[in-house]
Image: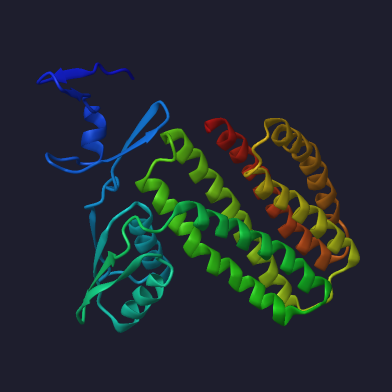
Amino acid sequence: MKRKVILMGGKTYVLSLPASWIKKYGIGKSQELEVEEKDNTILISTDKEIGSSKIKNLDFTNFKSRSLLYNYIYAAYITGNEEIKILFKTEEQSKIIKKVIEDLIGFAILSETKNSMILKDVTGSKTEFKPMLRRVFFILNALVTEGLETIEKNDFKELEEVIAKDHNMNKYYLFCLRYLNKNELGSASNNLSTYAFLNSIEAVGDKYSDLYKLLVSMNKKVSLEIISLFEKVNKAFIKVLDLFYVQNQDQFIEGLNDLKKDVPKLREEIKEFIGKPNKENAVIASYLLTIIEGINDSINDLLISSQAY
């Protein structure tokens, strides 16, 4: 977009700002903007965020589903609301709401009555996106590697602690989705592709957690054949996570090609176990199959994400 420089009063040079940007961030008369000079570039920015005045009203008085209550609050948070006003009926609902707040980075209870609560973002835009995104990747990596280590040691008590990592990761994941709904990473396509990729890798993390819960309930030593499959599946997922941060285009394409070649072979190898007589191995293999399918989805989202930047 090109703009003509206007000379006013013979001394002052003026450049108009795009009306769409002004409306998007609610820039008003006399408001101060940040102007930064970098070589032959001038950067103009505002600390205001998209939709920063949004308020969401939720009425849970007739809700009976615990999961629905969670999901509604999460949705209100992710979509970028700065304030969430909640009506509820029971003490149990109040406890659930307070439990949910633990997952909402930046939010706190502003006020509370017997049957209502107001949650508010008390940090604004102070929390940075990239460290939170890195945290998601770090926890997912730990979920995968530490999970296999405990399985190899036949330590299912420790595996329960690894499962907790998946829940701990959710708050960083939710924050990243919220940030992407409120801010642009250069362009809308960047946001959409990153959003999709985050959803796909988080879904894989959930599938790992489901498998770990199965193994805890079985409480039996896992065969070396299944351990070998685990290692191959883990290697594929960690490669997906690592490729997100690869800057070299040739290395990125090489990594994607390897995954596109290895994942279908691994899928077929897992399917062979499902048809074998050993029922326990077959059940575990069926869970591994859902993981590898999720990894395949994340590869496709990774490819789209790379093209958006």
Q: Residue furthest front?
A: 11
Q: How many marks?
A: 0
In depth, the one of 145 and 28 nearer the eye is 28
Residue positioned 72% across, 48% down in the render: 239
In the figure, residue 15 lies in which quadrant? top left
Instruction: Indicate how the structure is coloured in the image.
Output: rainbow
Q: Is residue 268 left or right of residue 14?
A: right
The residue under the point 57% across, 49% down is 200
Using the rendered view, name the quadrant where residue 4 is placed. Answer: top left
Quadrant showing the N terminus? top left
Q: Position of residue 240 (x, y in %)?
A: 68, 46
Q: Is residue 20 left or right of residue 28?
A: right
Residue 279 location, x and y as percent? 82, 66
Q: Residue furthest left?
A: 9
Q: Looking at the image, is 117 positioned above or below residue 268?
A: below
What percent of the width, then of the height, locates residue 306?
59, 35
**For the point 67% across and 65% down, which residue is it?**
143
Left/right of residue 177 with respect to residue 205 in the rendered view: left
Q: Nearer the viewer, residue 145 or 125?
A: 125
Tell whether 128 sits left or right of 72: right
Percent position of residue 61, x then y: 25, 71
